[in-house]
Image: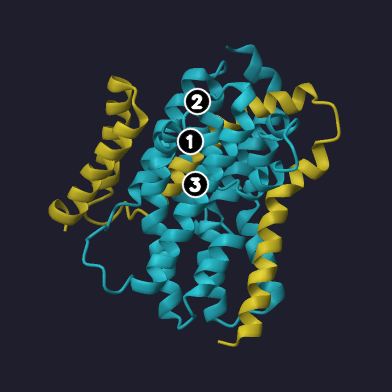
Chain colours: A cyan, B yellow
């Protein structure tokens, strides 16, 4: 796979991460935190909502323990991504620890949807993850340094991440052998969106989906 | 804000985030892939992706003008363009431009 065609795969993430990263950097600079913290947080934490949460916890002077627990719970959903990647990463070198580190919502989505021939897989995965992270780091540093003075009205551009999830859902649905999990996920998604507390929506919905998938394995596999 | 506070907060956030991503590999990787793990690997990603769509829409105010119209139209455009042309980038760019136009110029 050519480098440029890998870059092309990541463009939807670029369109989401740059403005979202800028929003993060802007918020960080409004809290009077020096810009290089945006660089360090995006490089070493690399979790969109986790970093926004960290900023709001910093602002309210939360304790270190609180920051640890809240971040862990917010990002717990990533465990489900790892669960779906165990076999895929199994034969990779030590570099898989970077892939595991970089398993954000969007990176997981790209890795899981694009079929890459086995012999290049590790390399392509590493490039995708590194590109995604570089977009995030660049966006957050730009936001921290000059978010206040950029004139372009990029309001609404974060919808590209929603659209990315829509498109990838369609792609995975086409490949899926069972169709009931899709319907169940739609129902859980609607219930979760309307009924669950906003900050716990994702982990509650994903846990519910995993529970239904496991508990009803027999009947889900029967009715094809 | 004190540097020492920021640095220790960041360090703990780094550890907590990496743990959430590493846990499944620590607990399940050494075992032989069971039919259950394979079944989860096959079916969970689609469920995750669908739920992420609704997660991305969770802050929409459905009861207030414009009643989530921009989001509904944006998602519909993404689906239609994707079913028609089967080109991920095209679907995402057109639906995002539609959405930006709607919230900046139409539903203001």
Cα distance, mark 1 to mark 2? Answer: 10 Å
Give x and y (percent) for residue B9.
65, 74
Q: Residue furthest bottom?
A: B2
Quadrant of res A88? top right
Mark 2 falls on what kind of element? helix
- Asked whether the residues under marks 2 and 3 belong to the same chain, the reply is yes
On the image, numbered disc 2 is attached to which residue?
A172
Q: Are marks 1 and 3 on the same chain?
A: no
Q: Are marks 2 and 3 in contact (CB under 8 Å)?
A: no
| Closer to the eye: label 1 or 2 | 2
Q: Quick one: which residue is furthest to the left in this view?
A: B105
Q: Chain of mark 1?
A: B
Res A80 seen here: yes
Residue that badge 3 annotates? A131
> Circle 1: is it few (<14), some (14-19), or many (20+) Cα within 10 Å?
many
| Residue A143 pos. (x, y %) | 38, 67
CA–CA distance in space, label 1 to label 3: 24 Å
Q: Which structural element holds mark 1?
A: helix
Identify the residue position indicated by label 1 in the image. B50
Question: Which image quadrant: the N terminus of chain B?
Answer: bottom right
Q: Which mark is residue A198?
A: none
């Amino acid at each position: 796979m050519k480098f440029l065609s890998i870059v092309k795969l990541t463009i939807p993430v670029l369109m989401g991460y740059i403005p979202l990263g800028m929003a993060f950097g802007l918020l960080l600079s409004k809290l009077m935190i020096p810009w290089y913290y945006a660089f360090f947080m995006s490089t070493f934490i690399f979790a969109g909502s986790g970093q926004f949460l960290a900023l709001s916890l910093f602002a309210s002077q939360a304790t270190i323990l609180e920051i640890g627990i809240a971040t862990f719970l917010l990002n717990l959903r990533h465990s489900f991504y790892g669960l779906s990647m165990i076999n895929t990463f199994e034969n990779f070198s030590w570099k898989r620890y970077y892939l595991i580190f970089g398993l954000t919502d969007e990176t997981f989505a790209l890795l899981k949807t694009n079929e890459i021939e086995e012999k290049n897989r590790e390399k392509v995965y590493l490039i995708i993850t590194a590109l995604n992270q570089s977009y995030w780091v660049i966006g957050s540093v730009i936001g921290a340094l000059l978010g206040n003075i950029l004139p372009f009205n990029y309001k609404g551009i974060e919808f590209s991440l929603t659209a990315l999830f829509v498109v990838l859902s369609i792609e995975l649905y086409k490949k899926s052998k069972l169709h009931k999990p899709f319907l169940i996920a739609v129902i859980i998604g609607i219930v979760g969106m309307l009924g669950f507390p906003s900050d716990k929506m994702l982990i509650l919905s994903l846990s519910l989906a995993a529970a239904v998938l496991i508990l009803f394995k027999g009947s889900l596999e029967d009715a094809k | 804000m004190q540097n020492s506070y920021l640095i220790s907060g960041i360090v703990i956030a780094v550890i907590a985030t990496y743990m959430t991503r590493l846990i499944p590999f620590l607990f399940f990787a050494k075992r032989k892939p069971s039919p259950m793990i394979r079944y989860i690997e096959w079916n969970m990603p689609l469920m995750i992706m669908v739920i992420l769509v609704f997660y991305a829409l969770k802050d929409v105010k459905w009861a207030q003008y414009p009643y989530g119209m921009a989001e509904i139209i944006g998602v519909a455009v993404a689906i239609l363009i994707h079913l028609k042309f089967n080109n991920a980038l095209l679907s995402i760019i057109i639906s995002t431009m539609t959405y930006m136009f709607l919230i900046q110029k139409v539903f203001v």
